[in-house]
Image: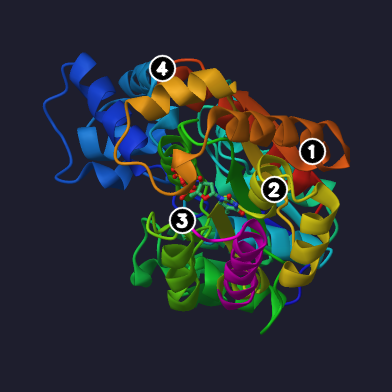
C-alpha cells in the first residue's frame, strides 16, 4: 500500500493497553455509583470514553463528563502504565522509518497520556507527530483528528487502527485504511477497510512490501562473576518484551547445540590442564558458531538478540585475566564474529572484592570461578580499560553494588534513554 505518512491509532494498535483502560473505566463508574455496567469492559477500549459511559453505563451527558474526569484521575495514577507494546511493533516502526515513511500517532486518547505512553514505551523516537484531542475537547471524533493530522504531513496516507472508528474516520477523510485484527476490534468492524492485518508482521508486509526489513537490535550483558548478571538479564529481557521486541536470548560460552558442547568443555572443573590459549580459542570458537547460527540470522530478521556475555568477556578474562593480551584477543574475535558487535552493552560494574563476597555465598564454582583473586582483579581492570576507550560508546554502565531493585531501576532507565537515541538514528 503506497503511503508517505502512516497514521497509527494507539490503544489496541500499537499498545495492548486494555488492562489500564478497563480498570480505570470500572473504577470511574463505581465512583459515580453507577448501576449499569457492560458485560465486558473491553468495549471501553478504543471509542471515545464519553460515548461509552453514555452507551454502556446509561449515563446522561453531564454524568459522562464527570466519569471521564474520574477515569483520567485513575488513569493518570496507574492505568497508563498497565500497558505493553505488541510484539513486532518496534520492527515495524523501524522498517517504515528506514523506508522513508513518516509516522504519526492519531488517537482519541488525551494527548498528555499519549505523550507519556509513547515516551515510556519507546514509541516517540519513531514518530513525526502525535495528534490527539486536548482536554477541552469533550467529543473527540476520529475524522476530525485525522483531518488535523493530514494538515501536518504529506500524503498519500494510510490510517491503521483496530476499531470501526478508525476505519470510518479514514473513510470520511477519503484516505486508505488498514484494520488490525490483533487489537480489540472484530472482523465485522473492518468491512469497509482497505485491508486487514492479523499481526504487526502482516502489517509490515502490507505497508512496506515483501522482504523489506530493518536490521534488528543486539544487546549484550557484561561484568565480572558475581555482579548479578543473571538477575539483571532477566529484568532487561522482561522490559524488552514489554517494549514489543521479539527476543532471541543467548549466552556465551554457548548458544546453539554445538556451542553448548564447547561450553561444557571450557567450564568442566576436571579440565585443569587446559592451556590459556586453548581456552581463548574455545571461547572464540563457541562465539563463531553462536554469531553465525543465532545472532546474525536474528538481526537479519529484524529482531532482538540479548547475549549474556560476548567479545568483551574474552577481552577482559582472556586478554586481561589470563594476560594473553587484549589486541590478540580482539583480533581473534573480530575474525570469529565477522565484526558483528552489539548496538548496546550493559556493563554491571562491581569492584572485585564485592564480587568475591557475592560469589562466596553462591553455588558450586565452575573452573573459571575457582581462579585466584588476582585473576579477577586483572579481569576487572581490563573491563575498565576497555570501556574507557572507544568501545565505551556503546556501553551503559550501571553500579551493580547497589541493592538489586535499585540496580534494575538504574539499568532500565539508562537503557531506555539509549534505545531512544538508537531509534532516533534509524
Ligand atoms: P557465565 O556463564 O556468564 O557465568 P556467570 O553466569 O556465573 O557469570 O560465564 C562463565 C564463565 O566464563 C565466567 O567465569 C566468565 C567466563 N568467560 C570468559 O572467560 N571468556 C569469555 O569470552 C566468556 C564469554 C566467558
Q: Is residue 175 left or right of residue 120?
A: right
Number of the label disc, if any, that sits on residue 77? 4
Q: Is residue 11 left or right of residue 364?
A: right
Q: Quadrant of residue 8?
A: bottom right
Instruction: For marks 4 and 2, give the CA distance.
Output: 41 Å
Badge 3 crowding class, 10 Å Cα cut-off, few under 14, some 14 to 19, many 20 or more, is few
Badge 1 crowding class, 10 Å Cα cut-off, few under 14, some 14 to 19, many 20 or more, is some
The magenta stretch is 273-293
Q: Earlier in the sequence, mark 2 or mark 1?
A: 2
| Discs 1, 4 touching: Cβ within 8 Å | no
105 and 53: which is toward the camera: 105
**How does the figure colour the protein chain or chains?**
rainbow
Q: Is residue 176 left or right of residue 196?
A: right
170 w.r.t. 83: above or below: below
Please provide percent x and percent y for residue 363. 29, 37
What residue does disc 1 label?
A: 386
Q: Earlier in the sequence, mark 1 or mark 4?
A: 4
170 and 279: which is toward the camera: 279
What residue does disc 2 label?
A: 312
At x 32%, y 32%, the residue is: 362
Q: Earlier in the sequence, mark 2 or mark 3?
A: 3
**Disc 4 element:** helix
Badge 2 crowding class, 10 Å Cα cut-off, few under 14, some 14 to 19, many 20 or more, is many
At x 49%, y 67%, the residue is: 255
Instruction: For marks 2 and 1, give the CA distance.
Output: 8 Å
Instruction: For marks 2 and 3, give the CA distance.
Output: 24 Å
Q: Earlier in the sequence, mark 3 or mark 4?
A: 4
| Discs 3, 4 touching: Cβ within 8 Å | no
At x 61%, y 49%, the residue is: 220
Instruction: For marks 1 and 4, give the CA distance.
Output: 43 Å
Q: Earlier in the sequence, mark 1 or mark 3?
A: 3
Q: Quadrant of the N terminus?
A: bottom right
Amino acid at each position: 500500500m503506497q503511503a508517505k505518512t502512516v497514521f497509527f491509532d494507539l490503544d489496541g494498535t500499537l499498545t495492548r493497553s486494555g488492562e489500564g483502560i478497563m480498570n480505570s473505566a470500572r473504577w470511574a463508574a463505581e465512583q459515580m455509583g453507577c448501576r449499569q455496567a457492560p458485560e465486558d469492559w473491553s468495549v471501553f477500549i478504543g471509542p471515545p470514553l464519553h460515548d461509552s459511559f453514555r452507551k454502556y453505563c446509561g449515563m446522561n451527558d453531564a454524568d459522562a463528563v464527570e466519569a471521564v474526569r474520574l477515569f483520567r484521575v485513575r488513569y493518570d495514577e496507574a492505568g497508563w502504565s498497565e500497558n505493553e507494546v505488541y510484539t513486532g511493533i518496534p520492527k515495524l516502526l523501524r522498517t517504515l522509518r528506514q523506508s522513508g515513511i513518516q509516522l504519526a500517532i492519531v488517537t482519541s486518547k488525551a494527548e498528555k497520556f499519549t505523550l507519556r505512553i509513547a515516551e515510556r514505551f519507546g514509541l516517540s523516537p519513531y514518530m513525526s507527530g502525535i495528534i490527539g484531542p486536548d482536554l477541552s475537547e469533550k467529543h473527540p471524533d476520529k475524522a476530525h483528528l485525522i483531518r488535523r493530522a493530514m494538515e501536518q504531513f504529506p500524503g498519500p496516507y494510510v490510517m491503521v487502527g483496530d476499531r470501526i472508528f478508525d476505519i470510518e474516520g479514514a473513510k470520511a477523510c477519503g484516505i486508505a485504511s488498514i484494520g488490525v485484527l490483533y487489537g480489540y476490534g472484530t472482523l465485522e468492524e473492518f468491512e469497509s477497510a482497505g485491508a486487514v492485518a492479523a499481526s504487526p508482521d502482516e502489517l509490515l508486509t502490507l505497508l512496506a512490501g515483501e522482504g523489506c526489513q530493518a536490521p534488528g537490535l543486539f544487546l549484550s550483558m557484561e561484568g565480572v562473576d558475581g555482579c548479578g548478571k543473571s538477575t539483571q538479564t532477566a529484568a532487561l529481557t522482561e522490559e524488552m518484551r514489554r517494549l514489543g521486541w521479539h527476543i532471541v536470548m543467548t549466552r556465551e560460552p554457548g548458544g546453539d547445540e554445538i556451542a553448548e558442547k564447547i561450553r561444557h568443555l571450557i567450564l568442566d572443573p576436571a579440565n585443569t590442564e587446559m592451556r590459556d590459549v586453548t581456552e581463548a580459542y574455545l571461547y572464540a570458537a563457541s562465539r563463531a558458531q553462536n554469531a553465525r547460527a543465532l545472532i546474525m540470522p536474528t538481526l537479519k530478521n529484524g529482531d532482538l538478540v540479548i547475549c549474556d556475555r560476548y567479545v568483551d568477556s574474552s577481552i577482559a578474562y582472556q586478554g586481561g585475566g589470563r594476560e594473553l593480551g587484549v589486541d590478540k584477543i580482539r583480533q581473534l574475535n573480530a575474525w570469529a564474529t565477522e565484526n558483528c558487535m552489539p548496538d548496546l552493552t550493559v556493563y554491571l560494574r562491581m569492584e572485585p572484592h564485592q564480587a568475591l563476597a557475592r560469589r562466596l555465598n553462591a553455588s558450586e564454582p565452575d573452573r573459571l570461578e575457582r581462579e585466584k583473586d588476582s585473576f579477577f582483579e586483572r579481569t576487572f581492570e581490563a573491563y575498565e580499560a576497555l570501556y574507557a576507550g572507544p568501545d565505551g560508546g556503546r556501553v551503559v554502565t550501571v553500579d551493580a553494588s547497589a541493592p538489586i531493585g535499585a540496580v534494575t531501576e538504574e539499568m532500565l532507565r539508562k537503557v531506555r534513554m539509549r534505545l531512544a537515541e538508537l531509534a532516533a538514528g534509524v
